[in-house]
Amino acid sequence: MESTGHAAGDAAGHPAEGETVMAPGKWNALTKELINVAMSVTNGGRFGINSHSTAARGKGMRDAMLAELPAVVGMANQINALVSGFQIEVNAPFRNGSRATT
């Protein structure tokens, strides 16, 4: 079965939301596409890997950037697996890292 990004968005029921989220905002559109490539690699989603890689190329991604991405994804996945598996507590200075302070 072949699909397109538009059809996948329709199937997910959120095409307009996706367009809004992926539009340039505080982060540029290329960075958002690279995050989507990384998440697709992590989740083993061939459709997402291919569609977001194509979109990222259209937004300026170069071969060297794509070549570096697996190392970044691999490092993050390895660290997350280790700290989760060993149930390592978050160090005090980093506990509120995901919350805005301003």
Image: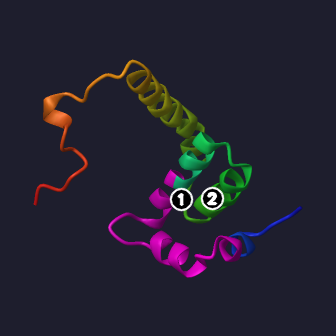
Magenta stretch, main secondary structure, is helix
- Measured along the vertical axis of the image, is residue 19 above or below residue 26? below
Instruction: Kindly state the secondary structure of the residue where label 2 is placed.
Output: helix
Mark 1 or mark 2, earlier in chain: 1
Residue type at mark 1 is Glu
| Three-letter residue code for mark 2 | His
Q: Is residue 18 above or below residue 83?
A: below
Name the quadrant containing residue 48: bottom right
| Placement of the C terminus among the 4 image quadrants | bottom left
Kindly indicate the quadrant of the structure image that contains residue 97. top left
Query: Furthest-top residue in view?
Result: 86
* Residue 52 disc label: 2
Residue lying at 39% horizontally and 18% vertically, measured from the top left: 86
Q: How many marks?
A: 2
The residue shown at (86%, 64%) is 2
Q: Is residue 26 magenta?
A: yes
Q: Which residues are magenta?
A: 9-35
- Asked if disc 1 and disc 2 are in contact, CB closer than 8 Å, the reply is yes
